[in-house]
Image (cartoon, rainbow, N blue to C red):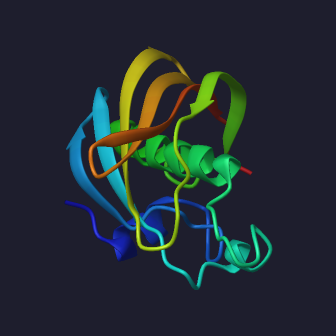
Amino acid sequence: MIEIREIMATLPHAYPFLLVDRIVEMELGKRIVGIKNVTVNEPFFTGHFPGRPIMPGVLIVEALAQTAGILAFKSEPGDERKPVYFLGLDNVRFRKPVVPGDQLRLELEVTRHRRSIWGFKGKAFVDNTLVAEADLLAMLGEEE
């Protein structure tokens, strides 16, 4: 299990844009499972939507991407702190709204890994119900 302090040391993201709270499973180079606890005090809920808070779909995809980034960094020692760039998103589907009090389970499997290019199949669940899914393609960039 990877707790929040190690996640913060691994990802270049910071509050309020860090969207992974814990890693509960990881098989280096193959798969990872992360957790995002969705709370009512998330800054995006004030505008999305007033009186009916729903987590924006793009942030669910971002949470999947951050979880994937942790797997890539941990699978390739020495790549920590390299920038990660989205190359593409395919087959993105949102199945059910995510609301305050939900816990997102972020499951990703590696579908491609060649040099600095990583492909993932990502699925997000709330209480074993699929709420979103996407195929992600990313690249670890050169150190700045």
Q: Position of residue 14 (x, y in %)?
A: 61, 73
- The reply, left or right, for residue 115 in relation to residue 1 is right
Q: Is residue 142 visible?
A: no
- The reply, left or right, for residue 50 in relation to residue 110 is right
- The reply, left or right, for residue 59 in relation to residue 108 is right
Q: Is residue 21 visible?
A: yes
Residue at the outermost front position: 51
- Please state, as top left, top right, bottom left or bottom right, where the N terminus lies in the image: bottom left
Q: Position of residue 92 (x, y in %)?
A: 62, 27
Q: Identify the residue at horizontal 70%, vertical 38% (top origin).
A: 85
Residue 95, placed above or below residue 17: above
Q: Position of residue 117 (x, y in %)?
A: 57, 22
Q: 75 or 49, which is in the foreground? A: 49
Locate residue 21: give its quadrant.
bottom left
Q: Identify the residue at horizontal 72%, vertical 26% (top origin).
A: 87
Q: Position of residue 82 (x, y in %)?
A: 61, 48
- The reply, left or right, for residue 133 in relation to residue 30 is right
Q: Identify the residue at horizontal 75%, vertical 69% (top origin).
A: 49
Q: 75 or 70, which is in the foreground? A: 70
